[in-house]
Image (cartoon, helix red, strand yellow):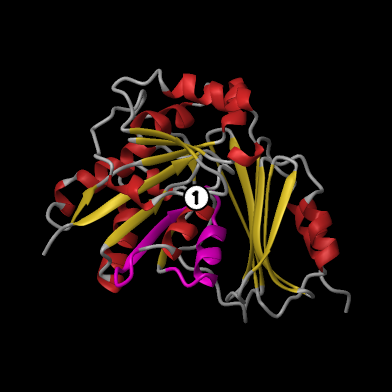
Amino acid sequence: MNSIPAHLILGFLGVGKSTAIMDLMQRRPEGERWAVLVNEFGEVGVDGALMETGGVAVREVPGGCMCCVAGLPMQVALNELIRREKPDRLLIEPTGLGHPSQVIDTLTGGGYQGVLHLASVLCLVDPRRLAEERVLNNVHFQDQAAVADVLVANKGDLCSDTDQARFHEWAAGFEPPKALVVETSHGRLELDWLTRPHSDRQAGDPHAHDHHHGEVPTEAPPFSAQPWQQYRNSGDGHYSCGWRISPDYCFDYQKLTAFCHGGDWRRIKGVMRTDQGWVALNRAGDALSEADVDPARESRVEIITDTPPDAEELDQRLSAALVDG
């Protein structure tokens, strides 16, 4: 039996990793089984819920755990995914606020020899954000880019020539040189990019990690007992506040989109039941993207901030977006 190629799809918050993975899954070669292991900074797993609505074979790791030193939550999820799906190829999406070194150590450790091998590592970058010192100086962003074999300038449709030139100048500064440096839009990753050779590229600070787990149960309580569930998490100077909500609750679409625009947040993402059907909402920066999706098992939404959020106030504001009556 050949070992399974495993690819890390890296990138900072809001760069389009999940969109890229879902697009890749739709274009995988006929007859091949691919699977996805996904981890988010927050506790409610919006990306996993979104991928499930698209028919993707996915397994989630609780918020932040994939990059913990022990890596046990990742190994449990990975083992289950391999056993359940028997994939021909595995895509792994660590949190955009996580450090890739511990994930790489787990994948290349003795426990997976002969089972899988680390193949090309891709890192998506929004060239516009290379003008931000807070991004360039972020150790996780630096190390995600450092370990990548392929650097991808995403969101080319939104970038200026100056943005793209800055990206290529920055990408040319890595030693050893990257196997491939490319531009794309809308998260489109060519299948050929997955075949580029993987090299052992060292992160600048493989031990950088500061993560606190919120008081979250291993398994969420059933909605019959708690139909409206709020979760919180913090680490690396960021904070998350998320909800898992019974599908019995329906949101007013207009009120919900107004809520998504209603705060100075780094990120808000959700898969929600509304009076106009199930929708995926995603705001990074000022732009809110919306898409119709198939019905999910539950509504999920997550907010990521730079400062501690007022969870009670956010809870009240979100509940006010429910359909009246």
The residue singled out by tag 1 in the image is 188
Q: Disc 1 on helix, strand or loop? A: loop
Task: Say if 92 sits above or below 236 in the image.
Answer: below
Instruction: Give the residue drawn at x 79%, y 65%.
Output: 319
Instruction: Give the residue drawn at x 56%, y 64%.
Output: 50
Left or right: where 116 falls relative to 256: left
Task: Say if 176 sits above or below 144 in the image.
Answer: above
Q: Is residue 213 visible?
A: yes
**Magenta segment range?**
29-56
Quadrant containing the N terminus is: bottom left
Q: Is residue 73 visible?
A: no
Q: Position of residue 44 (x, y in %)?
A: 56, 59
Q: Position of residue 114 (x, y in %)?
A: 12, 55
- Going by the numbered disc 1, the residue's amino acid type is Arg
- Mark 1 residue crowding within 10 angstroms, few (<14) / some (14–19) / many (20+): some
Q: Position of residue 182 (x, y in %)?
A: 44, 36
Whether residue 81 appears in magenta in the rendering, the answer is no
Instruction: Give the residue drawn at x 50%, y 62%.
Output: 48
Left or right: where 269 falls relative to 185: right
Q: Position of residue 321 (x, y in %)?
A: 83, 64
Quadrant containing the C terminus is: bottom right
